[in-house]
Amino acid sequence: MRNSKFNREFRDSTVQLILNNNESVSKVAGDLDINPKTLYNWISSYKKEHNIATQSIKTSHFGETLDEENKRLRRENKLLKQERDILKKATAYFAKETL
């Protein structure tokens, strides 16, 4: 393993901050001025060493997991479709009155 400017204690505490406090990787990377890819590598190594499942890394800009983001986007999509359908009906109604 090559020498790093960050010691093991710092790396572990940073990973624990992300995993335990529901912080997003991009936010922590920005706060600490570290490349997000470096943090992802630290998280991966930490999880392998401690036998932790690798499913819930927060990756989105809003600090939500991919499953949470997917659910939010599905709800938003459903609402937008309803709004579109209402606008279609309103357009047809007003177009019929003008003829």
Image (cartoon, helix red, strand yellow):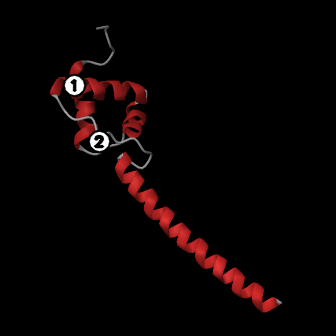
Q: Nearer the viewer, residue 1 or 34?
A: 1
Q: Residue at x 28, y 8 (%)?
A: 1
Q: CA distance from mark 1 to mark 2?
A: 14 Å
Q: Where does label 1 land, which residue?
A: 48
Q: Which comes before the other along the chain, label 1 or label 2? A: 1
Residue 87 appears anywhere in the view: yes
Residue 22 picture location, percent across and down: 28, 45
Question: Which amino acid, mark 2?
Answer: Ser
Q: Is residue 58 left or right of residue 95?
A: left
Identify whether 97 is placed above or below 11. Answer: below
Q: Secondary structure at mark 1?
A: helix
Residue 34 appears anywhere in the view: no
Residue 15 picture location, percent across and down: 26, 32
Q: Is residue 80 left or right of residue 99?
A: left
Question: Which amino acid, mark 1?
Answer: Lys
Q: Quadrant of residue 41?
A: top left
Identify whether 29 is placed above or below 76. Answer: above
Q: Is residue 4 left or right of residue 97?
A: left
